[in-house]
Amino acid sequence: MEEEKKSGETSSRIGQSKEERIKKITQFYYSRKDIQKAIFSFSASREVAPSYMMESFGTRPDYFQYPADIFELVKKGATSFHCSEELWADPLKISTGMNEKQLNELRTGWDFLLDIDSKYLDYSKIMTELIIKVLKFHGIKNFGLKFSGSKGFHVLVPWKAFPQVIHNNKTSDMFPEWPRIITKYITEMTKKELIEKITQMTKPNKYVKDFQASTEVIPDLILVSPRHLFRMPYSLHEKTALASVVLKPEEIKDFQPKDADPFKAEIRNFMPDAKPGEATELLREALDWYKTQHPEQETERSGREFKPIILKEISEKNFPPSINKILQGIKGDGRKRALFIIMNFFRSIGMERKEVEKTLSDWNKKNELPLKEGYIKSQLISSYRGKPIPPPNYDKDYYKGIGIIPTEEEVRYKNPVSYTVRKTLMGKNVKENKNKK
């Protein structure tokens, strides 16, 4: 009993010494004016909350009125600071129990933030580098990158980079649905290479795929939920006493926890100066991908089930003018949206898969700047995993967005599939009448 008592006292002293050490670090660290300014600047239009040794958050909602507010909270025991992805007209008007409409009226936008975390920092590095690769592939050059403070990283695409409206939906109202879809899309885009890279790291036999290890670094979907908070840039992490420092992409590979030493932290801007609409392609691609994965949701929205039409005689002369114009090749932007339209069009009229692949290959060669063959193959594989879905209706902004203006006749048929079916049947009837004569 005496030994247990001594052991308990020793553990208590160790715990107290660690807590005291972290408190001393926080006092020194947050007293820095540049740290206060960095945290305060990022907090604009966000709900913020201090954390007290990871035991509890402060009263919510809250916000900073002055940079000095941060150190005042530290004096009261705050050790870290967290904030929302969502941007608000007035964070103090948020209240528990608000319905979706009320939140939408108050929300002015949202940043897209990916939280990559793992038991092993090296796994998180691999996933982060792959995510950056996907962002750049979709034309996003300006994004934020920071250390989480433990064994992961945060990647941020700012609200400014997203379109205000897409598919007739106000983007600010589509939280958390659209950020979740983007997260799932990026996870799918990186999955194969992530497994291969982690397998190379963990297994001597390259033919044994380490699927389990790769699941440990899948971006956190829990973070993409209403009023969920994440650690602010330059906030400390209570368990590690490391700072959530901002990084450059080229620093990921060689990054070590010691580089986040709060005594050596140098201020960088986590919020990049993105170009308006810079993330439009990423959002479109993610929504298109999700549509192919969940055709039943489109059915629910339309109120009726779509059944693909099997046309025995498929002729380009019966294709809508918009489809034939796309098939002549795309100049400039819009190749991926065009691919989405014609791929679903061909599947919906019953074209054989080999013929679809050949037609898409021929079309791609006519593009001013062809898509990579691997991209087209991956889109086909993804599409054929689910049921055929029709291409977008003419009233959607897909066509206008790639410079295609549907004719009045096309608009009357609403969808390219309806147009083609009608023209094919009309041609068949004319042929049969001639034979009868």
Image (cartoon, rainbow, N blue to C red):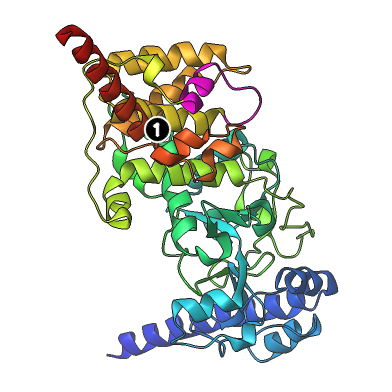
Residue occupying the far front of the picture: 437
Q: Position of residue 323 (x, y in %)?
A: 47, 25
Q: What residue is shown at x 44% (from left), y 60% (from top)?
A: 177
Residue 81: quadrant of the picture: bottom right
The image shows residue 352, relative to residue 161, as above or below, that is above
Q: Position of residue 364 (x, y in %)?
A: 51, 16
Q: Position of residue 416 (x, y in %)?
A: 40, 32
In front of the other: 211 or 272: 272
Q: Position of residue 113 (x, y in %)?
A: 56, 57
Q: Does residue 202 appear in the picture of this structure? A: yes
Q: Quadrant of the N terminus?
A: bottom left
286 displayed left or right of 269:
left
Residue occupying the far left of the picture: 436
Secondary structure of the residue carrying tag 1 is: helix
- Residue range corresponding to the magenta coloring: 321-334
282 displayed left or right of 213:
right
In front of the other: 434 or 125: 434
Q: Quadrant of the C terminus?
A: top left
Q: Which residue is mark 1?
A: 416
Residue 145 is inside the magenta segment? no
Q: What residue is shown at x 29% (from left), y 23% (from top)?
A: 426
Question: What amino acid is found at the position of numbered circle 1 in the picture?
Answer: Pro
In front of the other: 8 or 128: 128
The image shows residue 250, relative to residue 77, as above or below, that is above
Residue occupying the far right of the picture: 33
